[in-house]
Amino acid sequence: MIFMKKLLVVSLLLVSLILMGFSTHTSAAEKSTDIEIPVVNYHVISHNPDPNNLYQYSVEEFEEQMVYLKENGYRSLTLRQYFRILDGKAAMPAKPILITFDDSTSDFYPNAFPILDKYDLKATQFTVSDWVNDSWSMTAEEITTVMKNGIDIQNHTATHPSLDHLSYDQQYDEINDATAALNSLTGKRINVFAYPYGAYNADTLSVLENLGFKGAFTIEGGISTDKDNRYELPRFMILNGDTLDDFVRKLSTGH
């Protein structure tokens, strides 16, 4: 009889431990599905930003933000890592961030890239293909150099139009021509897009789908999640006048 009571007690303890473990596992699994990734967007990084140009940001303030990311344990993602997390194919690190730039302007190589490299931060540069080698843009050599050192190169159209003002065929040509040119330049698959001026319409989405794009980014603010439409992925911009406090706030709220 005593043996049976002891056996019952041991059995109950084992059941309790199993249930506790299951509960902990379930809780962890639930947390792992809360995918939230801030996606930050920059344009021009300048030593002498024009105070009247929202898209120009100072080198010093940019570096201050990159130092903040590094010192606070953020992990910068490649596009491949970003989409694998969204698609449930990879675990999300504790503090992920996707750093993006638009236009591939000439300042990126001498000003932004050395800072990213210094702090071992990955980034994506959305490139206007017809601007490559122009005086205000990166050269082909610079693009291939940064691409070999942690910078993804992706599509920002051929000529940077406001796509919502174009016909379906015109939009198709803008995006497809840039894809072909950038693929030829980089030797990489070009299948991620950023809307110039953040402008798009139903035709744009249809073009991207028909061309097999994996995703596209807006500039409407917000934090990226796995629930987002892949062709309406949110980014928040860092603009002239934004302080480090603004940057930190946007990392958590997207606004």
Image: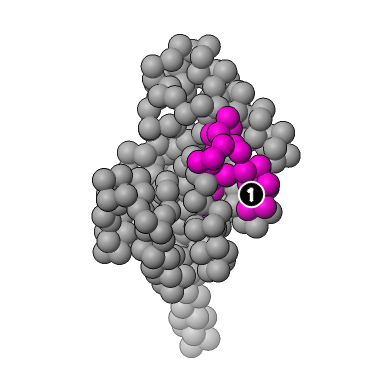
Considering only vertical position in the picture, is 149 above or below 10?
A: above
Considering only vertical position in the picture, is 14 above or below 30?
A: below
Considering only vertical position in the picture, is 147 above or below 172?
A: below
Disc 1 marks which residue? 142
Q: Position of residue 200 (x, y in %)?
A: 40, 24
Task: Give me the residue at 40% from left, 24% from top.
Answer: 162
Q: Position of residue 213 (x, y in %)?
A: 57, 30
Depth check, front residue: 101 or 70: 101
Q: Judging from the image, what secondary structure is the residue with disc 1 in?
A: helix
Q: Given the image, on which type of amino acid does mark 1 rest?
A: Glu
Which residue appears farthest toward the front when viewing the image? Answer: 135
Q: Position of residue 158 (x, y in %)?
A: 55, 27
- Residue 252 image-quadrant placement: bottom left
Depth check, front residue: 27 or 228: 228
- Residue 180 image-quadrant placement: top right
Task: Give me the residue at 51% from left, 14% from top.
Answer: 170
Depth check, front residue: 39 or 150: 150
**Mark 1, other Cα within 10 Å: few <14 / some 14–19 / many ≥20:** some
The span shown in magenta is 123-147
